[in-house]
Image (cartoon, helix red, strand yellow):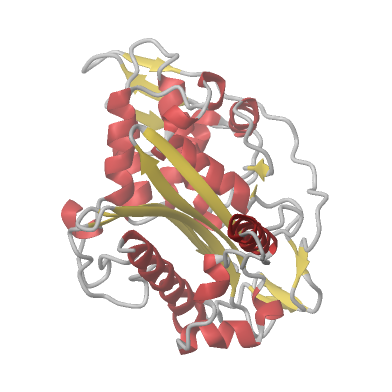
Amino acid sequence: MINRKKLFLGMLLCFFFLACTEKQKPIENPIQQAFKSNNPAIQYVLDSLKNHEVQIKFTQIDRKNEAVFFKDYDFQVNANHYFYPASTVKFPVAILALEKINSMVHFDMNTRFYIEGDTLETTVAQEITKLFAVSDNAAYNRLFEFLGQDEIHQKLQAKGIENVRISHRVSTPNADDITTRAIVYYTNDSTTNITDKIINKPIKPLKIDHLKKGKGYFEEAILLQEPFDFSLKNYYAIDAQHDVLKRIIFPEEFTIAERFTISKEQRDFLLEAMHTLPRELGYDTKEYYDSYVKFFMYGDSQELIPASIEIYNKVGYAYGTLTDCAYIKDTENDIAFLITATILVNKNGIFNDNDYEYDTVGIPFLAALGRELYQQELARKNK
């Protein structure tokens, strides 16, 4: 007679062995899961994916007691594959401007100043607010003059942020001038100080892939039948954008050397500027609707963004490239995630002709992607 005890132990061991050796189903990348959506805005891009140079980085955020845990997912993220970052470079420049004033005497974010040759008196706080609310180019250019190319590069590199080169201003004739203009600032109502001009190092061409794009471009109303060369343009890779955002949203998760040296007051101000909507600052809602510079989830709509959804982000769009880098927080359902993505929408392959599919392809894709990932996080929260 078979010993029942031995039989039971044998069955138990067999069950344990099968349980251990059974092939576990891999956890699906949420981005790939979002791509299974039948939303035409997503499927249209996937049907011609190579043409759109899509890169996406998504971070799930979990908390346990006081600890924060990140789980990153990538899709085609490649620092060696160039895309034009457009206005996303305004984010690190805003942070570094706050950092710089901390090393100056009689200068804070509310100190009045003007750029030599400029007629507008302003403050760093005012320029940062405009920079996020409506992606104001002149605001960015003023902060760029304040810093200079070399300081921007050195400060970011010192914090371990790689694959970034911010070399020029935007939408201005002297965009790549390596000499900055002097800053005149007030120490009281009548006394002024003037900073020295900064002479920066000459800008060298980038040496990565896909710097030449398309089949032609316009220069002074003349069509040149050759690829457009981005080798001297700004460069701000997806991982770099994600790393900068993480350092602002979760500074405690980084070493002191990796953090930006800004005060709590400055960080609180920056976060407020990042998620404040244009209407809250008095901008015309017909032109500057809630999603004017918020592409994920709401970019394809001009409806009001619910008060429970807070989006801390910086977008960029130029040369047919759309990019958004965002921390999205649902205060009602207690979920949050990070997402950075870029997409090229230039069907005819011609640059500087202002014929890009921003509203018909790019923004609908980013909005739909944001909604799909949000719904996944909502489902994960409710499990």
Q: Residue at x 42, y 73 (%)?
A: 372
Q: Within the image, what quadrant is residue 378 found in?
A: bottom left
Rendering coords of residue 355 (x, y %)? 56, 81
Q: Is residue 20 above or below residue 194?
A: below
> Which of the 4 image quadrants contains residue 220?
bottom right
Q: Where does residue 72 sit, x and y in percent of width and height?
A: 56, 52
Question: Can residue 76 be seen by looking at this rendering?
Answer: no
> Image quadrant for the C terminus?
bottom left
Can you say whether 309 is above or below 94 in the image? below
Q: Quadrant of residue 35?
A: bottom right
Residue 329 in the image: x percent, y percent?
Answer: 31, 53
The residue depicted at 31 percent of the width and 66 percent of the height is: 291
Above or below 288: residue 280: above
Q: What residue is rendered at 28% in x and 33% in y?
A: 268
The one nearer the camera, 91 or 59, is 59
In x, y percent, where is residue 354? 55, 77
Is residue 36 shown to the viewer in this render?
yes
In the rendered structure, the answer to whether residue 218 lies left or right of residue 133 reads right
Left or right placement of residue 157 versus residue 378 in this view: right
Quadrant containing the N terminus in the rendered view: bottom right
